[in-house]
Amino acid sequence: VRSTGRRGDVPARRAGAGVIREWGRQPLAHDFYLLAHDEHSGRSRVRPRIVGLGLAAALIGELILGEPAAAARSDGVPAGGVKVMAWGERLVVCDREPPADDLSRAVYEAVLGDNTRTVQWWITALSGTSLRWVRRRMYRAGLLERRPRQSRWALASRTAWVPTDPGAAALPWARLTNRLQRGERLGEHDGVLLGLLQATGLRECVLDEVPPQARRRTSAVLAELPEQPALLVAHLDAAVADAVLAHRA
Amino acid sequence: VTTADPPSARPGPATPRRAGPTPKSVLAPDRLGIGQVVGFSLTAATPMTVVAGVVVTGYAVTGVTAIPVAFVVVGLVLVVFAVGYVAMARHMANAGALYSYVAQGLGRPVGVGAAWTALVAYNALQVGLYGAIGAAAGPLLDTWFGITPSWWVIAAAAWTLTAVCGLCRVDVSGWLLATLLAGEIAIIAVFSAADLAEPAAGAVSTATLNPAGLTGPDVGAVLVLAVLGFIGFESAVVFSEEARDARRTIPIATYVCVGVSAVVYAVASWSMSVATGPDQIVQAARDAGPELFFTLATDQLGGWAGDVGHLLFVTSLLAAMVSFHNTIARYTFALARERVLPARLARTSRRTGAPVAASLTQSAVGAAVIALFAVTGWDPVVQLFYWGGTTGGIGVLTLLGLTSAAVVGFFSSPLRRPDSRSPRPGMSESLWVGLVAPTAAWAALVTGLVLALVNLPTVLGVPDGHPMTVVVPLSLLAALSGGMAYALLLQRIRPEVYAGIGYGAKANLIAVTPARESGIRASEPGVSS
């Protein structure tokens, strides 16, 4: 049994009022997207299927953490709070007020429509479209732009989704690296982010510039995650492993 | 949070339509029908390998002519087996691997024993294929390029291809396998028709289809061979989460897989015996080896048929090697996730997602065996391919027997009874599904296994007292008891690892999921209510 302290009682907490704007902080899915892709070329660092699983978990994570983007109402009034939670294995809705953000709301309503599925089921079910929807949300927010990709094969011309500002795109990476190096407390958002990186196999390559001593801290951070984020990370971990076991690539 | 009911929210007023993401559009409508599930699970089936390799070598080595009817009988047994198996699969966290059924139904120690047995059996099957590739590709290389390399040179080339495919996660793409499969079945159908058109004595004989042929003491031998043809039918359950109407699709797809295999193999092996005459098939198989299937047909169809057949035999063997290699790698990966094998074997490649550590381990086993046979000069077809195949067959028969017992154990456990306060009401199955069918399948499989072990010299085609008659059962027994002993050790020294046995990819979830409402915990067999 995990000792969760104050943070363990997630559903009771209503985070809306005291949202702390952090340095370069974006919704969880945006941060994960930026970490999972090269900031200059926009290429993904792991297989797209794994990125899709990570983004699906991040979208659920936004609802579990009650993040500002997911929680704020369309009229700008913060109506924050935890929207869904893991109940045993299942993912259930725990707030009547749907989130304001379109994408979060769609995920919220999908979960509302079926409370019998496990967290892992939702991660897998959302993974097929999560990349497309998150990209679209980031494009509308002005974080990504479309650029024709120079293809090695002259015939195929593909569109690359590239961060509009590589410097800003590197901010989540800089924030994580910086905090780990200085031994600062990561907080819930960055803790989950680290968990998502770990489960998708991205931790090693994203944190390659973190000295070994600080990198060892990541295990401690992950072990101290509150119950709800820890469950999310564990379900993502299982979904990624099941993708390895799946017969189709 | 200690409340008994999950918090829930009532659906609010209907949301207005908008062009953005909707609950429906965020979920991929990736739903598989019966045809697709059958396609995915049959891609691992390589009929040409079974017909030209296993059947012909089986005729030659055992001298038993009842092989065609054995395919029918084993097909029927597996359909009965599948009744309880697909029902239990719905409650499995790791539905693709038979050992997790055993862990749930008969307890974790037997489960680990089954897992180790499966690893030995599948490795014997995979490595055995390297022994057949020389005989299959040799004639082609001679005709086309005029070269006659040693069998182990060809085997080494095939090994390289397999190892690279395993590392790059070239799960040989679906359409390629489907094309090969269709080609193999087509050419088997053409060859069989040609064989039936030219019966040996002028009349088509049904002697080898007579069930009376299965009453002799050698029946165990043919049952072991016949089981080999069906491996892979158990994988349809993996697609249950993606299937449309899984409760209907998955059972039907499983039965279709078994049925198609039974018909193809029974007809092909029967038609060969018709073309040579039932009394001559054994001698003909001994004289010609795997070539028999092709020479019989080319007599009537011309040389092109032989070339096409040979080519498909080679591709079939290669596909079987890669697919068994990947199966073993995934098995190893799942066991490493559970920490039943060293956790290091769960390492995957970031780029390709292939379970690289597990794949390299299997490749190392293959390389060692090829080198051993190349150095000692043992016969690649009889001693590597055939003995590997029969060892694998006996192992798989053991595994299927344990699984059917596990189905009975699972559904008859007190938690599963409708009157108990089951944490998942409605889990109980009918008497037929939960007890009668799996018990019948268990009895049939154990009978087959006992017959095979009693007649081991016939199964292996060796004289009484040959060392192989001790080595084969002993290696499987060692794996089974070694696994059980290891699990009991884990129970004492690493209870948290022991708790995750049988959950495959989800093993880590056990540690973090709170006990409330947890389905994966609810399906533990040992918990009393």
Image (cartoon, coloured by chain):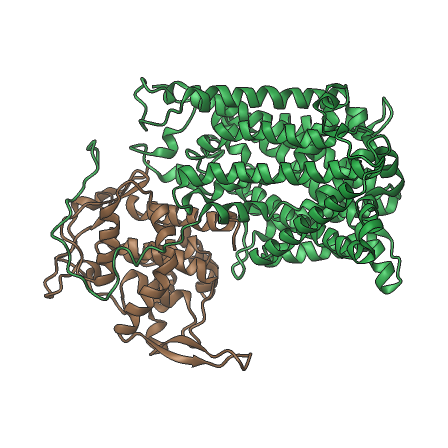
Left or right placement of residue A38 versus residue B456 in this view:
left
Residue B258 image-quadrant placement: top right
State which chain is coloured brown: A
- On the image, the x and y values in percent for residue A194 come to 37, 56
Asked if residue B102 is positioned above or below residue B28 in the image, the reply reads above
Q: How many marks?
A: 0
Left or right placement of residue A207 versus residue B447 in this view:
left
Inspect this view and state whether residue B490 appears.
Answer: no
Q: Residue at x 53, y 45 (%)?
A: B38
Q: Residue at x 19, y 40 (%)?
A: B7
Q: Colour of chain B?
A: green
- On the image, the x and y values in percent for residue B68 come to 71, 32
The one nearer the camera, B501 or B36, is B36
Q: Residue at x 14, y 58 (%)?
A: A18
Residue B64 image-quadrant placement: top right
- On the image, the x and y values in percent for residue A103 come to 25, 61
The one nearer the camera, B302 or A154, is B302
Inspect this view and state whether residue B316 appears.
Answer: yes
Residue B69 image-quadrant placement: top right
Name the residue at the front extreme.
B202
- On the image, the x and y values in percent for residue B335 come to 54, 39
Asked if residue B482 is positioned above or below residue B509 in the image, the reply reads above
Left or right placement of residue A169 versus residue B442 in this view:
left
Which image quadrant: the N terminus of chain B? top left
The one nearer the camera, B210 or B144, is B210
Which image quadrant: the C terminus of chain B? top left
